[in-house]
Image: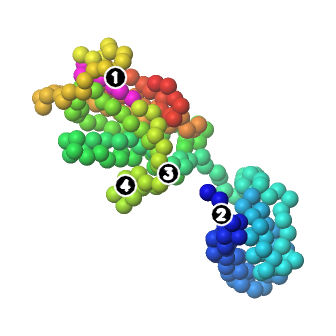
Amino acid sequence: MTFPVDLYYDRCRPLIESTREIVEKLLTGHPEAQLDTLYVTGGGSELPPVARVLKESFGRKVRRSAYMRSASAVGLAIRAASGSEQLHEQFNQNFGIWREAESGRAIIFDLIFPRGMHLPEPGQHALRLERTYQPAHNIGHFRYLECSRLDERGQPIGEITNWEQIQFPFDPHLSQCGDLSAIPIEPMTAENSLLVREEYTCDLNGNVRVTISSLPSGNKREYAIGQLASS
């Protein structure tokens, strides 16, 4: 689509004004401090309407940072050098798997590693989580995904990215089969005594793995999970 640049700037103006109001509130909250210079940084501040609003409000006191597009990197370096706070690697998305519910009549999201969860520090054990249940079918189809947000029911919304898909033979008679895609999915008998255990781990580098075991048959397989991981 093509539309006038003035229209684009007009649509941006309310968002820029909200940022200006925050800056003014910060300044009025410290009347004893004399404002000599207001440094502007970040790639978004290169947008012409941003400079226009700043000039209208603060005049010649506005100065562009010498590191416009490196603000985050410089700020993190300063904080790390100060030692005042420790920085932690963490999940920036909610990671989980689709599950069947209500005897297959519904699909729900099972959250495994939530957004914001810290990864282990060097020397610490990997994150670990288990799921145990009785299988309803002869083959399990595991569909992993990540999402930016969850709704009030815990279901994924926002930006959703599909990850690895795994097929695992719950039926002991299929344990030696390599390719399960051609085998029909059939319900297990109600009397089956099988127990499935999923063990998830995540190391300090963010590498997620799952070990799926079928008990008491002893069938076990380990998979690396990731958008580009190979089973």
Q: Rounded to the nearest whole Å, what is the CA distance between mark 1 and mark 2?
A: 49 Å
Badge 4 or badge 1: first in the primary sequence: 4
Q: Which residue is mark 2?
A: 3
Q: Rounded to the nearest whole Å, what is the CA distance between mark 4 and mark 2?
A: 39 Å
Q: Are marks 4 and 1 in contact (CB under 8 Å)?
A: no
Pair 4/2: label in front: 2
Q: Rounded to the nearest whole Å, what is the CA distance between mark 3 and mark 4?
A: 15 Å
The label on residue 159 is 3
Q: Which residue is mark 4?
A: 154
Q: Residues within 10 Å of mark 2 (few under 14, many from 20)?
A: few
Q: Rounded to the nearest whole Å, what is the CA distance between mark 4 and mark 1?
A: 30 Å
Query: What residue is at 48 percent from the left and 43 percent from the top?
Result: 161
Residues drawn in magenta: 166-172
Q: Which residue is mark 1?
A: 181
User: What secondary structure is found at the residue carrying circle 2?
Assistant: loop
Q: Residues within 10 Å of mark 4 (few under 14, many from 20)?
A: few
Does 112 sit above or below residue 173? below
Would residue 168 be counted in the magenta stretch? yes
x then y, percent, for residue 34: 83, 82
Q: Rounded to the nearest whole Å, what is the CA distance between mark 1 and mark 3?
A: 29 Å
Badge 3 or badge 4: first in the primary sequence: 4
